Amino acid sequence: MGATALGPISVQMFLPVLPSIRSAFAVSAGTAQLALSASMLAIAFATLAYGPLSDCFGRRPVLIAGQAMFLVGSAICVLAPDMGTLVVGRVLQASGACSGMVLARAIVRDAYPVERVTSVLAYFTLAMACFPMVAPAIGGLLIDFVHWRAVFVFSLAAGVIALIGVALGVWETRPDRTDRVVGERTGARRVLGTRGFWTYALTGAFGSAAFFGFISAVPYLMIDVMGRPAREYGFYFVALAVAFMGGSLLAARASARVGRDRMLVLAALAILASGAALLALYELGAVHPLALFAPGALLTFAQGAAGPNAQAGAVAGDPKHAGAASGVLGFVQTVAAALCVQVVGSLQDGTPLPMTGCVLVAGLGALLSIAVLRSRTGA
């Protein structure tokens, strides 16, 4: 569980560091954003590899290798003398951290029948939200009272604990019937050829783009535009984490009764509503953290509810290729999120409009994606 939390922690604890990095290395907002968007692209390509590798060699050894890579990247970030080195460290850190996120989905698919996957993933996601819930607050305190590099020292310590936990507490779950050659060479290809997989993957990708576009812009708006301290951003972020947990709990308890596709439709509508609220509050002249975090809580609640359903739909196919499906799903979601993050960062103009546009476009994309599935299945 701790290994799975490294991914969200490494992203969310890093967010309040962005303004400090920009000042420390005297770079533009778009350049500083590379430390986030490049690491997210690294996550995308790494998740594409972790799934098939785990189908071939097993979940446990691949997970241990990922945790070790996270430690190397964290150490580089601690010592980075310039922006380029920091980006390299972030890429390695993120590439290792995502191993837990990818392989958790495959392990759940290995261990539980398909009808229980959505519920188990939702509870798992709910538990994971407890760890990153306080990460931005810890990051803000470290930045304000120690140094921005202390965030990476904290990540390094967390990685050591996670690696020990994986080595001692995780056993192999890959089905014995999984063919190693098929798992490595044809798993991803078969997943890519499945139309139902793509519908769920795109729905999840648009939701991730909306969420990450929002959380990547909020530190800039709060710290640089509103002049609030980093620790205040961290405390407000707790509301987003609580909302995410609420959405995950709803998915765990209601998805079987309401239906996976209906849950996704409702979540997409909630994302659109959050974007509309952000736009309305800006037009009304509201300049306060609550004008960002109140709509953001609705967006995060929707993402918490949508994520497990999109993940379950994507990995519900052949269990022999659950790792490959999880990896491709992570790739699609993270590429969409990284592109949105970089676009929003490059367009930053001191207003919430670039972020708001991202949320609205992504919400509409999610709604259209799930509408295609419903029309295809006649639901």
Image (spheres, helix red, strand yellow):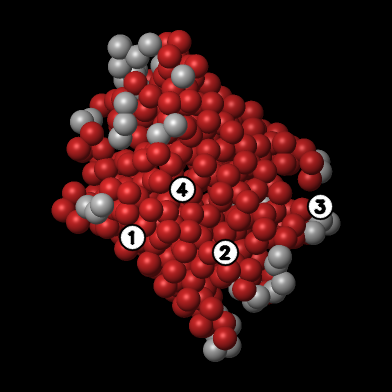
Label 2 vs label 1: CA separation?
A: 18 Å
Q: Amino acid at mark 3?
A: Phe
Give the amino acid at mark 1.
Val
Q: Which residue is mark 4?
A: 202
Check the picture and name the quadrant holding the N terminus. Answer: top left
What quarter of the picture does the C terminus occupy? bottom left
Residue type at the position of mark 2: Cys
Tell me the residue at 40%/46% (across/down).
199
According to the picture, the residue beneath numbered tag 2 turns out to be 358
Give the numbered dot on residue 265.
1
**Relative image position of residue 149 (x, y in whole percent):** 68, 46
Q: Which numbered disc flags the more N-terminal residue, 2 or 4?
A: 4
Q: Is residue 51 above or below residue 349?
A: above
Q: Position of residue 138 (x, y in %)?
A: 52, 54
The percent coordinates of residue 35 (x first, y second) are 69, 47
Q: CA distance from mark 2 to mark 4?
A: 15 Å
Mark 4–mark 3 distance (CA, rounded to whole Å): 36 Å
Does 79 sit above or below residue 340?
A: above
Q: Residues within 10 Å of mark 4 (few under 14, many from 20)?
A: many
Amino acid type at image mark 4: Leu
Q: 151 or 126, which lies in front?
A: 126
Q: Which residue is mark 3?
A: 25
Q: Give the CA distance from mark 4 to mark 1.
A: 13 Å
Give the foreground label among 2 and 1: 1
Marks 3/2: CA–CA distance? 28 Å
In the image, residue 327 above or below residue 297: above
Report if the CB atoms under discs 3 and 1 are less than 8 Å apart. no
